[in-house]
Image (tube, rainbow, N blue to C red):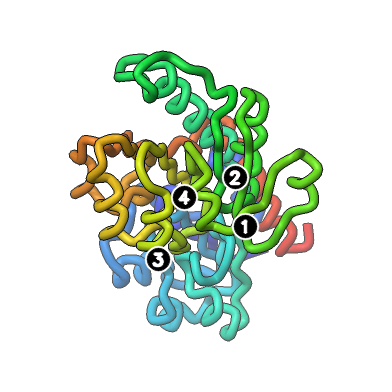
């Protein structure tokens, strides 16, 4: 059992999960606002031996060095790699601190977002139809960049509606091949596709000048990641063609508020993976990580 557990910012646990935290620590402190800076984070952690955080604050090596009592950090958000994490995991591990995170809790909402926006565009609901007249997803060439959990679910959804699916990933996926999905090199994929869905880890940039050159006009680009999948300059050049359109749910995925007024950008600035059901899954996974660490 921990001596003191502190959530330094809102962590999106459901009420019953917040109550359950008291079974894991003698003292539990939950902050309901985001700390303004590193000094405030250090102050909030104090003498805590367990820390929880979401994706809005960052635990740097400098901050961790000022908090000698920490033995456990629970990230209440996606953790795919040390490079994309908002915790300096390598430094933490060098100090003997265990860092856990979660995955695959909000993908269903992301898939629904892509399907919803694509249907509206294809049929012309509230906007000009993509081909000038209503059409179905049936027969669309959909390219998935990054065939992880959400990318795979988007591919499956598009296949259900009759799309032709191809993908690019770090390696060819036998399970995808069994479903009839074709593996293509990235340049070939973006050239072939009508619709490109980027489903990449945070801070992973794969679309550069060459990819946008091969992508060409009359394409639909979705980014469902937490950060841009592209270099901004060639992205803006690609958007200068009025036949192209880009969808992102959040400013983080788009690259900043300065792009929201672009006539060919559709950004709601709403995290589509944050649903009631997602918070249930998040809570369950966060509690399971703590219980596993404590051997319960």
Q: Secondary structure at mark 1?
A: loop
* Mark carried by residue 272: none
Query: Where's the N terminus, which quadrant?
Result: bottom right
Q: Earlier in the sequence, mark 2 or mark 3?
A: 3
Q: Nearer the viewer, mark 2 or mark 3?
A: 2
Q: Report if the CB atoms under discs 2 and 3 are less than 8 Å apart.
A: no
Task: Of the two numbered discs 1 and 4 on the same chain, state the one appearing first in sequence.
Answer: 1
For label 3, count other residues whose C-alpha is less than 10 Å away and answer few (under 14), some (14-19) or many (20+): some
Residue 169: mark: 1
Which of the numbered marks, if any, corresponds to residue 225?
Answer: 4
Tag in front: 1 or 3? 1
Q: Position of residue 64 (x, y in %)?
A: 45, 77
Q: Quadrant of residue 15?
A: top right
The residue that label 2 is drawn on is: 151
Visible in this render: residue 234?
Answer: yes
Image position, residue 260 (x, y; %):
23, 41
Is label 4 or label 2 in front?
Answer: 2
**Residue at the location (42% across, 16% down)?**
123
Q: CB atoms at circles 1 and 4 under 8 Å apart? A: no
Residue at the spot of label 3: 58
Q: Secondary structure at mark 4?
A: loop
Quick check: marks 1 and 2 in contact, CB under 8 Å? yes
> What is the crowding at mark 1: few (fewer than 14 residues within 10 Å), some, or many (at least 20)?
some
Q: Along the line of sight, which residue is nearer the eye, 288 or 255? A: 255
């Amino acid at each position: 059992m921990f001596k003191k557990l502190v959530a330094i910012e809102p962590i999106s646990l459901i009420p019953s999960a917040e109550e359950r935290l008291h079974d894991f620590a003698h003292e539990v402190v939950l902050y309901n606002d985001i700390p303004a800076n590193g000094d405030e984070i250090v102050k909030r952690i104090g003498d805590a031996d367990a820390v929880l955080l979401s994706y809005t604050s960052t635990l740097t090596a400098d901050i961790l060095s000022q908090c000698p009592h920490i033995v456990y950090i629970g990230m209440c958000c996606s953790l795919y790699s040390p490079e994309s994490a908002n915790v300096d995991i390598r430094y933490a591990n060098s100090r003997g601190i265990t860092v856990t995170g979660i995955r695959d809790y909000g993908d269903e909402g992301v898939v629904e977002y892509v399907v919803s926006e694509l249907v509206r565009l294809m049929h012309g609901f509230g906007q000009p139809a993509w081909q000038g007249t209503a059409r179905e997803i049936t027969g669309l060439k959909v390219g998935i960049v990054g065939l992880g959990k959400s990318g795979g679910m988007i591919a499956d959804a598009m296949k259900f509606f009759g799309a032709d699916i191809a993908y690019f990933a770090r390696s060819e996926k036998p399970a995808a091949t069994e479903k009839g999905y074709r593996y293509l090199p990235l340049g070939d994929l973006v050239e072939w596709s009508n619709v490109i869905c980027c489903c990449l880890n945070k801070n992973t940039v794969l679309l550069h000048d060459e990819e946008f050159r091969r992508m060409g006009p009359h394409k639909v680009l979705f980014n469902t990641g937490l950060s841009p999948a592209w270099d901004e300059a060639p992205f803006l050049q690609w958007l200068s063609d009025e036949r192209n359109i880009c969808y992102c749910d959040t400013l983080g995925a788009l690259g900043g508020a300065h792009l929201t007024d672009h006539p060919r950008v559709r950004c709601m600035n709403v995290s589509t993976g944050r649903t009631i059901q997602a918070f249930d899954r998040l809570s369950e996974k966060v509690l399971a990580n703590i219980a596993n660490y404590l051997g319960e």
